[in-house]
Image (spheres, rainbow, N blue to C red):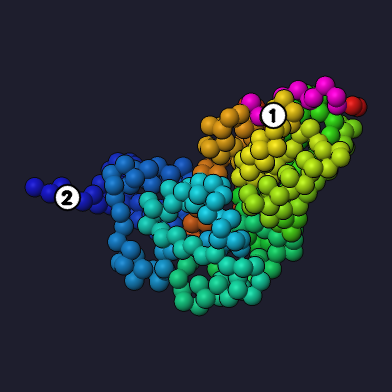
Amino acid sequence: MPQTPPTIADVARRAGVSKGLVSFALNDRPGVASETRSRILEAARELGWTPSLQARSLSTGRSFACGLVIGRSADVIAADPFFHSFIAGLEDEFAVSGQVLVLAVATPGRQEEATYRRLAADRRVDGVVLTDLRARDERVALVRELGLSAVTLGVPDVESPLSSVSVDDGAGIHAAVKHLVDLGHRRLTHIAGPDAMLHSRRRRQAFHAAASAAGVDGRSVETDFSAAQGAAATEAILSSADAPTAIVYSNDHMAVAGLGVAQRRGIAVPRDLSITGFDDTELGRYLHPALTSVTTDARAWGKVTARTLLDAIGGAEPVRLDLPASTLAMRDSTGPAPNDQSG
């Protein structure tokens, strides 16, 4: 005989709460303690309980969908492991609470604004996640105008009524620079992302501050975060007369490309050149040499962001959450500076 599907009553018994509290938690309504909500969601996950989306939509007038509009090239997104892990974290939470993730890629500007307006006008989403915050980001005011709940990754540089979830990625860059200076490096270059993105700008600023504090030569090159531009920037700086002995990349994607460039030029890593990445993606740990990288838990970031967005949709007051600061995972792509290094 087929097994009877679990019910809300089963979830309530497993979590040790009332059916009413389960309903509040699963419908993202306020008044449920965070620990209790987590226990209820875990019980639902263990039992394999899934909600009736049609019934919930009819009874609440909500779409039970959340949007993620990414303003980058589709090619960059497809190749960047950060987004894969972050989206997996969102799905970890949304799947249990019966949410659907609506993903869209749009060019920043009019196309991006039109995408948000269409999502709101069609009532396709109840809330959105704002990634890659930009200087004086107009999306903060836009989602407020559209009546969409929203959470930002990082804190905007404009007044914002939205919840935010942040990681101090500057701490990881400082750690990378200190590690390289301790190894004797005196000529460092940072291959950064677009300066218009706040998190890229913060990483670049952290790099220059750390290099200045250590009294070493620190330069930076702007890219679009893609492997192609990371490789091109690496070619250019390694061809210069005063090439660095260490490169601090703003993501693992570019660091992997840079490692390939160095090896094709006959430059041994780390004997002749040290390399650090950012995000500590799984692939980097299996390279030869294994990649020294700044660690961030993108999947955990996605989970916390999803929970924070669901709370916002449920009417909770805005919060600013700071996740543990990034750290440095030291592996084989960094080593002592070449003997001819001066300083």
* Mark 1: few/some/many CA within 10 Å (<14, 14-19, 20+): some
Tell me if 58 is positioned left or right of 165 in this view: left
- The image quadrant that residue 266 belongs to is top right
Whole-percent x, y for residue 187 in the image: 84, 34
Q: Nearer the viewer, residue 116 or 178?
A: 178
Seen at 25% across and 46% down, the residue is 10
Queried whether the magenta region covers residue 336, the answer comes back as yes
In the image, is residue 118 above or below residue 85?
below
Q: Is residue 228 left or right of residue 94?
A: right
Which numbered dot is residue 4? 2
Residue bearing the label numbered 1: 268
- Give the amino acid at mark 2: Thr
The residue lying at 68 percent from left, 48 percent from top is: 230
- Counting from the top left corner in percent of width and height, residue 232 is at 71, 49
Which residue is painted at 86% across and 40% down in the image?
241
Q: In the structure shown, which secondary structural element does the residue marked by tag 2 occupy?
A: loop
